[in-house]
Amino acid sequence: MSITAESAQGDQYAQPETEVQGEPPARIESVPTIDGAKVKVADIEEWLAALVVNSGSPELLQVSTRYSQEDPLGAIPYGLELRWHSGAKIRLNFQDAYSSGGRPGAAYQCPDTI
């Protein structure tokens, strides 16, 4: 997984962070579906979204994007974009996904099931 951040407009890393709070997003009830020993990567993406949202952080505005739900799909098929009340964004990009004993393929070319 790779993580990138986009600061809120006007943020300066040399200055202390200004915490912006608001209403946290509604809880998500989600458990990945298990099919024998296989797990859908989209279910892991959904589980991570639920994990972040269910933290109840008043700084989090929303999970604005689940990449696997975009139409059309982008170059990175799995990941999340989190938006914060401050205007900042964080992107969690699935760089690799593979089953135990497997080997990663090309970067960001995750299989649908592991």
Image (cartoon, rainbow, N blue to C red):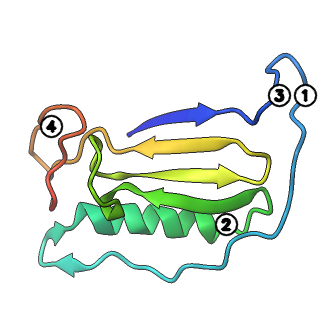
> In the rendered structure, which amino acid carries the disc numbered 1?
Pro
Query: Do the numbered discs 3 and 4 sit on residues whose CB atoms are within 8 Å?
Result: no
**Residue highlighted by disc 1:** 16
Q: Which numbered mark, 3 or 4, is in the foreground of this view?
A: 3
Residue type indicated by callout 3: Gly
- The first of marks 3 and 1 along the sequence is 3
Percent of width and height locating residue 27? 62, 79
Secondary structure state at the residue bearing disc 3:
loop
- On residue 104, the disc is 4
Of the residues tagged 4 and 1, which is closer to the observer? 1
In the structure shown, which secondary structural element does the residue marked by tag 4 occupy? loop
Above or below 68: residue 100: above
Q: How crowded is mark 4: few (under 14 residues within 10 Å), some or many (20 or more)?
A: some
Residue assigned mark 3 = 10
How far apart are the two marked residues, 2 and 4, measured between alpha carbons? 30 Å
Residue that appears at 29% across and 64% down: 42
Q: Is residue 98 left or right of residue 80?
A: left
